[in-house]
Image (cartoon, rainbow, N blue to C red):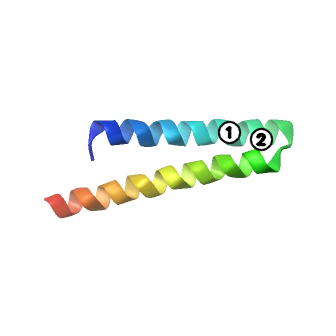
């Protein structure tokens, strides 16, 4: 996994957490769910990159 991919995934994860927190604070379930989705998407990308790295070795 390249450093650039790690940084992008971390940014997506942090953005998702912020969006989830904003949604929770304002009572906006849609925004809260979008934040959770962004976090899950980031985790899946991270897992996919780890699998690719494992096959490269």
Dividing the picture into quadrants, the one containing residue 23 is: top right
> Is 6 rendered above or below residue 44?
above
Q: Residues within 10 Å of mark 2 (few under 14, many from 20)?
A: some
Please tell me whether residue 16 is drawn above or below residue 41 in the rendered image.
above
Q: Residue at x 34, y 42 (%)?
A: 5
Q: Position of residue 44 (x, y in %)?
A: 46, 58
Are the residues flagged by discs 1 and 2 in contact, CB closer than 8 Å? yes
The disc at residue 8 is none
Secondary structure state at the residue bearing disc 2: helix
Q: CA distance from mark 1 to mark 2?
A: 6 Å
- Whole-percent x and y of residue 20? 70, 43
Residue 2 position in % (x across, y down): 26, 42
Residue placed most toward the observer, 34 or 20: 34
> Residue 45: x, y in percent?
42, 54
User: What residue is shown with label 2?
Assistant: 23
Instruction: Give the residue at x 16% y 59%.
Output: 56
Determine which quarter of the picture holds residue 6.
top left
The numbered dot on residue 19 is 1
Q: Is residue 38 left or right of residue 7?
A: right
Depicted 26 relative to depicted 54: above or below: above
Most distant residue in the right direction: 27
């Amino acid at each position: 996994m390249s450093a650039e991919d790690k940084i992008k995934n971390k940014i997506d994860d942090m953005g998702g957490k912020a969006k989830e927190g904003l949604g929770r604070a304002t009572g906006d379930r849609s925004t809260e769910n979008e934040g959770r989705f962004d976090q899950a998407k980031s985790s899946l990308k991270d897992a996919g990159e780890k699998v690719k790295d494992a096959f490269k070795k």
